[in-house]
Image: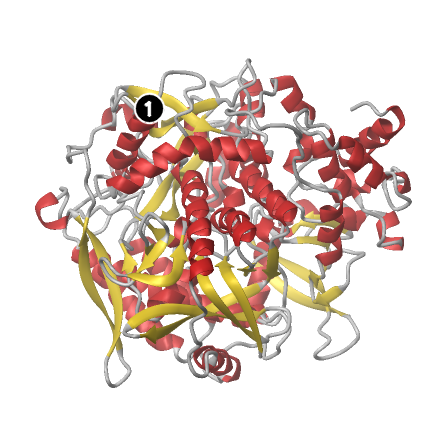
Amino acid sequence: MQIHKYDTVIVGAGGAGMRAAIEATKRSRTAVLTKLYPTRSHTGAAQGGMAAALANVEEDNWEWHTFDTIKGGDYLVDQDAAEILAKEAIDAVLDLEKMGLPFNRTPDGTIDQRRFGGHSRNHGEAPVRRACYAADRTGHMILQTLYQNCVKEGVEFFNEFYVLDQLITEVDGVKKSAGVVAYELATGELHIFQAKSVVYASGGTGKFFKVTSNAHTLTGDGQAACYRRGLPLEDMEFFQFHPTGIWRMGILLTEGARGEGGILRNKDGERFMEKYAPVMKDLASRDVVSRSIYTEIREGRGCGPEGDHVYLDLTHLPPEQLDAKLPDITEFARTYLGIEPYTDPIPIQPTAHYAMGGIPTNVQGEVLADNDTVVPGLYAAGEVACVSVHGANRLGTNSLLDINVFGRRAGIAAAEYAHRAEFVELPENPAELVEKQVENLRNSTGTERVAVLRKELQETMDANVMVFRTEQTIKTAVEKIAELRERYKNVSVQDKGKRFNTDLLEAIELGNLLDLAEVMAVSALARKESRGGHYREDYPNRDDVNFMRHTMAYRETDASGKDSIRLDYKPVVQTRYQPMERKY
Amino acid sequence: MSTATLDKLEAEAQTSHNIKVTFRVRRFNPEISDEATWQDFELEIDPKERVLDGLHKIKWDLDGSLTFRRSCAHGICGSDAMRINGKNRLACKTLIKDINPAKPITIEPIKGLTVLKDLVVDMEPFFQAYRDVMPFLITKGNEPTRERRQSAEDRERFDDTTKCILCAACTSSCPVFWNDGQYFGPAAIVNAHRFIFDSRDEAGEQRLEILNDKDGVWRCRTTFNCTDACPRGIEVTKAIQEVKRALITRRF
């Protein structure tokens, strides 16, 4: 086992991790540990754009953006954080341009902007062009540009190093981050990284759903590592279902398609969003559109012999516009469905897309141990974190923004903390937990298979905690997850080797998914209201009196070693916006 | 709303159309043996599924030790370039029906890079060549307060090469690269092109000098393998030709 010492360790090399690394490397000795090669991260799959009130093509300002973000999040957004997001958005986009990002341009050579869901002029009057974009591959360009700048800055990467545990040492009664334990995929060796600062930027956890836009590798590794060490997870019941995933496959088709004029239609060809959102129509917020689609399907207006999808219609748009603005998603339709978007509408259904919840942080990216206490030396940014700028529902283009604004903030804060802090002593036997976990899995002769359990998990999540939820469906999920967690103890892998053991890796990932699915379901059960992405048919209204608060879920372990979830709540930060009824 | 293609798609999706296919996979695990071998797996699969789905069926249902990289599963992350029926492709962008499933489908690691296990190769030399062309924007003078201006035409000039996902399908399809791993390879040249022809960049000359090296663009024999292999549809050979021309004319 090797022990490494760095000022700052960043876990994950997607947008947030690399944005943090660019700052941290300039200021401190930094290592980036990443499960995947950096350019494989799922930031690259983001398509439509990154919001910033540049006002390049029409009047706009960051205050409108702040309001839209708060309203979009159904008022569960921490308003101080949303204000920072919207204000710093402008520099975040300009910084990327200066780093080389090839944005689409206006006729006068400035960054072009387009419409996106929930982004409006003057507090909801009409859609506004706020999304800065590079065709429908904005995420790809951000990921490439950030990697390019990491190369330029000489960022030190440990590729295919999988962080499995967060080390915490108590110093004078204060829990401090001491470092992390990582598993080197190529060799099967464990590595201890002692660090003054650790930044989690390891992404989302969408793979506990079956129909999802998420990569196979998005298994909530960072969330799980912190949660198992007693740190809370915030607002995990809020998960975003993107309205337009390719039917049955879940592959993302950007909201930018509707920003460019695409229309959702039911089997009668009706533009049904006019009924549900008379002003914003197809560009209402994602939770609203996804629920509308499922309402159409449930009421018998879905398309196809089974009536289980609707259409995204681009056929009225000029082919030149599709080629210039939406080249990738039109190619996906051709490749995976064999249809021609110039002439055929595209069958779509909502797809599990984004975790609004995650590791709670303040606006400096510092991780919280409870409602107010920070964990010195521990940071998080991006989808793994909950700051909370997305509240109960994230607006499209705000995640590419989030990773840049809060990735940068966390990178700076972590490096500056490393300057003034001393190394925290490692716990005794720092790798003990991981060694046991890895060896148990490798040596297990159990009869359960990873793929079988994962499939059952994904099926129960899709059936019970998706767009529509009730007490009964959530309870069904909770019971099923408990059963699967029990069966997981009896799981075994076929590959017993050390070298590139991805069989073992998938088993570990499944353990993370199961723990996080449980947190999600238990948090959802307790939230007896409907807000943003969390819709309870048995409690169809928002309840600000009882639930205008963040959920904080903690793992507790009793004397016998049995774990359970304790829920607590944290107030929402409100500055200037009073909650109003949400209409689009 | 319906169209003929759409009706067919929706009707077909109702019933299972699984067919039997053979995946003939190149296996190598130095923990077990120094020799690589072929192993056949019989699968039932819908021909509209991806080769990656087939590999997952093997890994999840038949043999957990089969090892390959993958992540996004829709052609964006660049993890799963492999040699499928002798041609470099992304497993997640190749549908079974498009590669003659009547015969065994051969699957091997991409060539020219050291195989570490099964379909996993050592990507370091590939990324080193990429890093060597200075793949980042270099500018001089003071930064503007707002964005740098760039006309839509200037932006269009290098659009094709911005699409690269660094999957290595091109470089590992190049016979010159197979024979001599010192050659920068198409992907590195594509990424140099992306900056040489970016009107905002001011280090084109330096990059051209790097590619003027004995292991640079002049090694290209214009076999077009790279263009055929690129899953993003980049005209790789054309980009290399443009870099060659820029070296001669010093205009870009």
Q: Residue furthest left?
A: A545
- Residue A68, by quadrant, is top left
Question: Measured from the top left, where is residue A522 in percent x and y?
Answer: 23, 62
Residue B147 visible in the current orientation: yes
Vertical arrangement, residue B224 with respect to residue A232, above or below: above
Residue A201 visible in the current orientation: no
Q: Secondary structure at mark 1?
A: loop
- Residue A282, by quadrant, is top left
Vertical arrangement, residue A173 with respect to residue A310, above or below: below
Question: Measured from the top left, where is residue A201 in percent x and y?
Answer: 45, 54
Residue under pointer 1? A271
| Along the line of sight, the residue nearer the viewer: A564 or A287 | A564
Question: Measured from the top left, where is residue B122 in percent x and y?
Answer: 72, 61
| Along the line of sight, the residue nearer the viewer: B245 or B110 | B245
Give the image's coloring scheme.
secondary structure
Q: Chain of mark 1?
A: A
- What residue sits 52% from the left and 52% below the top? A27
Query: Is A35 on the left-hand or right-hand side of B116?
Result: left
The N terminus of chain A sits in image quarter: bottom right
- What residue sits 14% from the left and 52% below the top? A528
Question: Measured from the top left, where is residue A96 in percent x and y?
Answer: 53, 35
Vertical arrangement, residue A69 with respect to residue A434, above or below: above
Q: Amino acid at mark 1?
A: Arg
- What residue sits 30% from the left and 42% below the top? A81
| Along the line of sight, the residue nearer the viewer: B204 or A343 | B204
- What residue sits 35% from the left and 55% below the top? A366
The C terminus of chain A sits in image quarter: top left
